[in-house]
Amino acid sequence: MLADRKVRGIVCFVAIAFGLAWLVALPLWLGDGLFDARFGTVALAVMSTPAMAALLMVFIIERPQGKARALGLWPLRPVGRLFVYLGLGLVVPVALVLVALPVGDVLGVYPGDFKTFSAFRMILNGQLLAAGQVELPLPIETLVALQFVNMLIGAFINLVPALGEELGWRGWMLPRLMVYGPVKAIVISGVIWGAWHAPLVLLGYNYPMAPGWLGVLLMIGMCTLVGAVFGWLRLRSQSVWPAALAHGAFNAAAGFHLVFASAGAPINTTHGTILGWSGWIVPLVLVVVLVATKQFRHAAAPQLPSQESAEAPASDR
């Protein structure tokens, strides 16, 4: 009985999150797609839909006693463990994004330039020309180093919109899927997370050189692997905050493929960067190691509050 209710709850949550995502993205489909002036605002709004679905589940549909705990927002202890996984959340996703670039370069699917940063130099020169300037204010190496500072700041700025996704996927949904075992829970949550991106991916977002259906499949693959890392942080810390910070850092680091690319060479995200198959190699190895060392199985799954509402019969509690 309780298992059936959990399944219905998950299905209800997914239906709400997907429905809201398509509804919010509808203006882009009726307008100019990725070139619509409202794209940035709509994309941020779409990111909030999993959190909306989770909040509806917690405050209206299920109404558990510990609402903050049900979302992974609380408790923030033990503090030491939380800070360890917050630190990992800041470092590991960025490392995965960066290591995907030389891997893709070696495999011939990413046009890397790790010495002169020619693509980044070209971008900066274009910006200087538009501003009426001629020379770079600092050496190119210094400007590249400053991108890491910008990424660090961006990780914390992105924490808020990232929480709009993580509150739903890893905060609310993943712990409920753990009843099927850690591997199945990670795979199911990753597939759902990836498919949820369809309203934007089908418009050409993230995979502009691939047909829409292939872009969605690739997004599912990437989200399954990267989502496993986010899920590991969520389960080990018993908190959604490390996963949200990891998501924010991941998004902040996404633009590094432009910093380390060769000028004039097209970047096909179907094959290169963390979005393409070559970028999945290192995350796959990491996830296999985590599974083999039972990092998901031995992690104490977040203790969920009662899933039943206050009106549920005592025999069902």
Image (cartoon, rainbow, N blue to C red):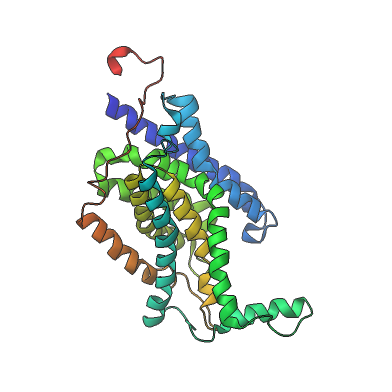
How many marks can you see? 0
Residue 168's x, y, as percent? 45, 41
Residue 272 placement: quadrant:
bottom left
Residue 19 sits above or below residue 108 on the image: above
Residue at image point 64% right, 78% down: 123
For the residue pair 10 and 284, the one nearer the viewer reads as 284
Quarter of the image with the C terminus is top left
Residue 180 sits above or below residue 242 on the image: above
Is residue 285 visible in the rendered image? The answer is yes
Left or right: 218 in relation to 36:
left
Residue at image point 54% right, 54% down: 156
Residue 220 placement: quadrant:
bottom left
Left or right: 73 in relation to 314:
right
Is residue 202 visible in the rendered image? The answer is no
| Residue ranking furthest to the right | 132
Residue 67's x, y, as percent? 44, 29
| Residue ranking furthest to the front | 80
Residue 257's x, y, as percent? 50, 73
Residue 176 placement: quadrant:
top left
Residue at image point 51% right, 78% down: 260
Residue 1's x, y, as percent? 27, 23
Residue 148 sits above or below residue 298 on the image: below
